[in-house]
Amino acid sequence: MTDSSASQPSLSDRYTAFIDKIIDDTLKGKVRSKEYVYNQLLKALRLGAGEIFERCLIERRAAIQQQLDTPGGAGRAKIERQGRALSTLEDAWAKYQQSQQRQSASSTAAMRLMRADAGDRLSVLADILDPNQTYVFNVQTIEQLAQALGQAQSEDPAITDELHRIAAGLTQGLKSYTTLQPHLLGWIYESSRTVGFTQSTVSANNPWNYWANHIDRPLPKQLFAAQTRNQSARDLAQTSTIDMTAWVELMVLLRGMQAGLVEWFDKQPYSFQMGRNLASATFLAFALIWVELSSGFSDRPVAGAAGLSNACFQVALQILRRFAQRDNFPLYGGVFVSFSGEAFRNTITYLDQPLKAIEKTQEKARILTVLGYSQQWGGNRKQAQKLYEEALDLAREASDKTCEVANLNHLSRLFLGQREFEPATNYGQRALLLARQIGDGTGETNAIANVGYAEVRQAQQQGRATMQMMEPVVQRLERGMTLAEKHKDLLSGLYCALGLGNAYLVLEQASTAKPYLETSVATAQQAGHLALEGLSYAALAETHYQLGQFLEAVVPACLGAYLLKETGAPEQQAANLVAILRGQLGEQFKQALQRQRSQIVARISLEGYDALLEGE
């Protein structure tokens, strides 16, 4: 008796024949579109046999490549056409795999939600949508999940109802994002002023106000309007209806908005530094909203509030983790450009709770670093020092050497601002040694600038120095300037220029010092660092004084004294020089100010100019 199965072609043979037929039909012009190839593939595939088909594809690709690699092979043009035809089939296979992956992910997610306890269902949804997961849900997968949940049925009518409300929220969230997406970045183009998330007035370039005007969904509109007024999202959570569909909609909408904004800012269309700062601000601003919502719900003794509180808190943690894992995480940058405002909530206070909940020390160390930098920039030095020290300990625990170098550098620079040059030097030297060990160019640049500047200021305090003593310091700072330019590190370049100017002042080489100090004035203005601008003006005035250019010294001395006083910097050098010049020049002192009135007013306002003129 003959075994009929022996005469049947194997599945591998069938797939090989199918692949050859698609290639042959393509070469004969019978294939109308990529969609046709995809539909033919769906008909040919057998459930559970995808690995066999993929192996056949690989073998056919290898055979074509071998023919192309054979020297002097005949029919090369035809073989290349076969390769292109096979590429179309490979694309169809990739599309099929993605579809299967989405189907599997959405089915698994729907089952998880169905089996979850009622109070945990939103937290489970937040976990499913977590962008830190291995498989990240995209629009198509969320659509499939919504469809699966919308068709779900349970023996318990309450579970069925909740699943259907989640499905409605997912669908509406995608619709709301589709509505808002064309307007996501319009606020940037409507104003040339500073771009940010926390403007203190309702204006065109306030994104929250702009978004509120382009969406009619109740809950998002309320949230955006509150953000426009710089009000905490906590108030919304305490007063709004516990509507699961609406809050799921908001979860999907904000998730899409955050991802869209970060993606656009990362393209750095106008400025690398600005783009990086705005991406960082986006992560922190959205994390802050979810923390505030969580806090608001936690105080409400009504059904569903506890589950919403937990889900909101979980989303905030996910955002912070995502932020800390970025390749371009700003270890040397804060979010001061756009994450500020006169009435803005205390970021540290609100983020303190989720930071405590982060178990991964590396992520926590990095987030504390950037928050410390922002606090330092805002003048909160004690809070900044506390954050840096905690981040330094955590970085060491996690063996995150780059983060460790950054916090050593930040502490060094913090002490520089307080005129405590010995600890500034110690921290800077430790940062320099470690940065060179691990090949951290940015860390080395910052450390060189810190150590060199601290050494110059110590020499100034001592009141005397020789060229032999200062030569290695000058060489260090010159290298620092080169590295700062290479790494586009504006602030380190500023410290180096100011340090070099001061070094030549100590050596009484004012002519050599002058161009460095003019550079430091311009760089300080560009960086927006008022204290260093004040120090730069003060040193430039001293340069003119050493050169006997007393009238030329008046304006920089006055600007230096004014800016240092305004920033609370513990410096008397400029104020003392102003007093000396006023006494030496008499009426000529006022005349020098009057001649440059427009320049002074542009820098420190008319009120500031009047104060200088009156000697206040």
Image (cartoon, rainbow, N blue to C red):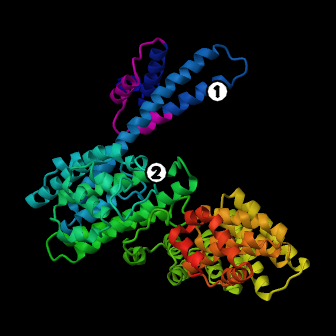
151, 537: nearer the viewer: 537
Q: Residue 226: horizontal and vertical position, in percent? A: 27, 64
The reply to whether the magenta stretch includes residue 47 is yes
Q: Earlier in the sequence, mark 2 or mark 1?
A: 1
Apparent side of residue 428 relative to residue 204 in the rendered image (left or right): right
Image position, residue 143 (x, y; %): 27, 45
Q: Residue reaching furthest right? A: 468
Q: Which residues are magenta?
A: 28-55
Residue 310 is covered by the magenta coloring: no
Query: Most extreme residue toward the front, as rendered?
Result: 587
Determine which quarter of the picture holds residue 320.
bottom left
- Observer-nearest of 233 and 172: 233
Q: Residue at x 14, y 73 (%)?
A: 302
- Residue identifier under label 2: 192
Q: Position of residue 422 (x, y in %)?
A: 71, 86
Residue 242: quadrant of the picture: bottom left
Q: Amino acid at mark 1?
A: Gln
Main secondary structure of the magenta stretch: helix
**What residue is shown at x 45% (from left), y 27% (from top)?**
89
Residue 136 or 196: which is nearer the viewer? 196
- In the rendering, at what x and y percent does residue 90 appear? 47, 31
Element carrying mark 2:
loop
Question: What residue would you read off at disc 1?
Answer: 66
Which amino acid is tagged 2? Answer: Ser
Question: Is residue 532 visible from the viewing direction of this image?
Answer: no
**Neighbours of disc 2 within 10 Å: few (<14), some (14-19), many (20+):** few
Count of residue discs: 2
